């Protein structure tokens, strides 16, 4: 796939099977799971399906969760991008997930800014982001990149904060 975004420090590109080990590490991290309230960390097989599904979304819809690499080291540090809100749309949900070793370095804000700008230009559907009320770091990222709290509601069976871009 030819899709690629770049920032000063990051390269955002389609996920590959080579990313599986780090994705399993990210999604299996107990602190990560506490922040997203995931009860069962995925293994290699589940993450392989995740990569395949997002690459199919990219092919059919023009958006997906993409791998985020540190340009200096060339190492994957997380993922960022889009998928259908509550797995069905019509809105597009933006999300980001990063390895705990890079938390606090501004990678989430940098990648999410690039993805949001891209999405606002390319997509004709509304973009939302959801986050747990107690995930203050993620809420700060959303506010920093130009999203504002729209409402609090049940999403994915949990009470979540729903954010929307300040400029549609």
Image: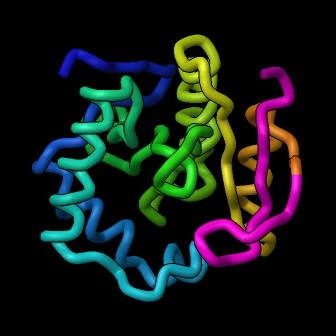
Residue reaching furthest top? Answer: 121
Q: Locate the C terminus and report the quarter of the image it occupies.
A: top right
Q: Nearer the viewer, residue 29 or 102?
A: 29
Query: In the figure, residue 26 lies in which quadrant?
Result: bottom left
Instruction: Say if residue 11 shows up in the picture.
Output: no
Q: Nearer the viewer, residue 7 or 133?
A: 133
13 over 31 or under it: above or below: above
Q: Nearer the viewer, residue 34 or 7?
A: 34
Query: In the figure, residue 126 lies in which quadrant?
Result: top right
75 over 49 or under it: above or below: above
Residue at 29% over, 28% down: 60
Query: Which secondary structure is most common in the magenta stretch?
Result: strand
Q: Position of residue 160 (x, y in %)?
A: 74, 67
Q: Nearer the viewer, residue 18 or 150?
A: 150
145 over 53 or under it: above or below: above
Q: Locate the N terminus and report the quarter of the image it occupies.
A: top left
Q: Position of residue 85 (x, y in %)?
A: 56, 49
Q: Position of residue 143 (x, y in %)?
A: 82, 42
Q: Position of residue 78 (x, y in %)?
A: 40, 50
* Residue 110 appears left or right of 48: right
* Residue 19 appears left or right of 97: left
Residue at 49% over, 80% down: 38
Picture mark count = 0
166 within the magenta span: yes
* Residue 143 appears left or right of 103: right
111 within the magenta span: no
Residue at 25% over, 48% down: 53
* Residue 156 appears left or right of 132: left
Residue at 40% over, 47% down: 79
The magenta-colored residue range is: 151-168
């Amino acid at each position: 796939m030819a899709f690629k975004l770049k920032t000063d420090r990051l390269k955002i590109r389609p996920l590959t099977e080579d990313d599986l080990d780090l994705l399993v590490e990210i999604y299996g991290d107990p602190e990560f799971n506490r922040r997203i309230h995931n009860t069962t960390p995925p293994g290699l097989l589940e993450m392989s399906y995740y990569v395949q599904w997002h690459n199919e979304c990219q092919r059919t819809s023009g958006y997906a969760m993409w791998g985020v690499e540190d340009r200096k080291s060339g190492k994957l540090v997380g993922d960022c991008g889009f998928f259908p809100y509550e797995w069905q749309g019509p809105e597009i949900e933006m999300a980001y997930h990063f390895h705990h070793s890079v938390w606090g370095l501004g990678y989430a804000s940098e990648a999410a800014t690039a993805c949001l700008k891209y999405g606002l230009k390319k997509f004709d559907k509304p973009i939302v982001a959801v986050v747990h009320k107690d995930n203050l770091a993620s809420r700060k990222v959303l506010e920093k990149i130009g999203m504002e709290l729209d409402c609090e509601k049940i999403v994915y069976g949990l009470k979540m904060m729903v954010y929307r871009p300040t400029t549609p």
